[in-house]
Amino acid sequence: YKYTRAKCDFFITTPIYYVNSSPHIGHLYSSLIADATHRYHNLLGKCETVFSTGTDEHGTKVQQAATTYGASYKDFCDKISQEYRQMNNKCDISCTHFVRTTDAEHVIAVGEFWKELSKRGHISSGTYKGWYCDADEAFLADHQIQIVKDNNGNEIRLSVESGRTVSWVEEYNYKFHLSQFKSDLKEWLKCDKSIQPEKFRRQVLQWIDEHGLADEDISISRPKSRVHWAIPVPGDGQQTVYVWLDALVNYLKVMGYPKLRSWPPNVQVIGKDILKFHALYWPAFLIAAGLEPPKTLMVHSHWTVDGEKMSKSKGNVVCPFKAVDSYGVNAMRYFLLREGTPHSDSNYSEVKLLRVVNSELADTLGNLLSRCCGRAINQQQRFPPFIEEDFNLYCKESAKDLIKMVNSLPDEVGQHYLEFNFYKGISLIMSVLREANRHFEFTRPWELRKSLQNEDIRRLNILLYLIMETLRVCGIVLSPVVPDLSSKLLDKLNIPSVQRSWIDARPTWSLEKSSVAVDLLKDKVVLFKRLEI
């Protein structure tokens, strides 16, 4: 492979989202996984990062959607693409690049990539035959088709993925010689990290070994007479570039293709419904062009709504804008990353969302901060210092479980974040906070506060230090998930912005150096206001 010397130290992408309809929470979830991963790597000290997202704007379904909406293709694409930009802004998505496939630079990149594949002998023209699904915009293999009977008892063929009808098509177009790269694909897939979670890597190997998906040429163009809202094939005005080849080149365009600044991507986040295109076609296209495949495809499963598949016909599609307006950005980010399990489908329920965020963000986290910072217990309004003698005397034994949990928290949570299991990292953080609440109650600081004895004053101060230090550590490790809420927490504790990186998440008691008291931020903070049903 041609390896381009890195000029960025972390490169992550989301899929570019198809503009045939407005964003839903599945799109937001893809972007949140990428965003939280990007923020985590920023905290690790990676500052030359690229995080790209965008919109995929060509093809039959866009033609149809624009016509139904009653707008020109361009105006329709502009409208929906802007909605994805707004979703990013509204949900604190920290992307550095937003690609549109209708941008002139992207069209040029697609043309250059096509010419590179052609120059290397990987494209030929001829008649292509097969079962074609308009809804999937793809030719389907036999195992991707199910035969059912209609109301009249006639057999019809449907796409397994979309449930839409397929028809037999024979047409002239250009083909990519996928079969030539079967062994290269299997070599790439030998690496455990090539596709995560592992079940999806095994699925792709099964497609290759048992279903023969890498054994045949694939059609990479369409007749312009059928798909005209698309990029023309270089040198052939009667053919347009297949929407998936067009779309995949967006990742190259971000890095300045054909003169790449950096390659390959470290992580590419995708939904399981587009796994075939990213795990078979995309690496094969790259290898054919002399480029290295992505280091990791991070694949996530889908969201159901109240136990049912999300669909327009059922009217249960969850709009991210309405959800954030109702519950706030912290609640939505937290719930989706808390409940989302990449390896299996997750369920979105408003009742569960309210229960989870009220219990964990308002009660477990928010109330603990409020009690530590309230004048009833913290009269001096300070984050007390670490005093080793008092810590050893009053905390080391009575709070040993909490201390042990906090000591290991950054490493354990960081490992889960590296593996894209944000739900596991959040679960650990909540376990620590529940233990902190338990220890706080057990120590009865409201009684220590009333005492004038020096020992009780020392006991109270070191308790407040222990709990606030736990909150500080949790605030840092939660920041990739809920950056706004974490900032409020760390601001209240008066933690300087330059002391919020992952290395700062080590508890100061583990450094065994005395510290000085810090005045709390004077403004009263409600970290998370309970949501009402």
Image (cartoon, rainbow, N blue to C red):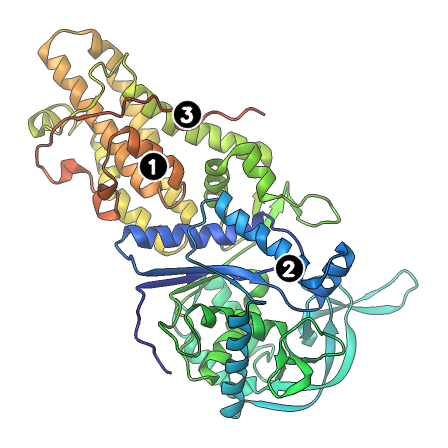
Amino acid type indicated by mark 2? Cys
Q: Quadrant of the N terminus?
A: bottom left
Give the label, 3 or 2, closer to the camera: 2
Question: Label 2 to label 1, Cα distance in Å?
Answer: 35 Å
Amino acid type indicated by mark 1? Ser
Q: SS at mark 3? A: helix
Task: Answer with the quarter of the image where residue 167 lies.
Answer: bottom right
Q: SS at mark 2? A: helix
Q: Is residue 189 above or below residue 199?
A: below
Where is residue 254 drawn, in percent x and y? 44, 67
Of the numbered discs 2 and 1, the one sitting upstream in the chain is 2
In the picture of the structure, the residue carrying the numbered disc 1 is 487
Q: Is residue 380 left or right of residue 90?
A: left
In the picture of the structure, the residue carrying the numbered disc 2 is 77
Give the label, 2 or 1, closer to the camera: 2
Give the label, 1 or 3, closer to the camera: 1
Q: Is residue 15 above or below residue 238?
A: above
Q: SS at mark 1? A: helix
Of the numbered discs 3 and 2, the one sitting upstream in the chain is 2
Q: Residues within 10 Å of mark 2 (few under 14, many from 20)?
A: many
Amino acid type indicated by mark 3? Asp
Could you say which is closer to the camera, residue 403 or residue 482?
A: 482
Q: Is residue 204 left or right of residue 165?
A: left
Where is residue 479 drawn, in percent x and y? 35, 42
Of the numbered discs 1 and 3, the one sitting upstream in the chain is 3
The residue sitting at 6% across, 27% down in the picture is 389
**Residue 51 in sight:** yes
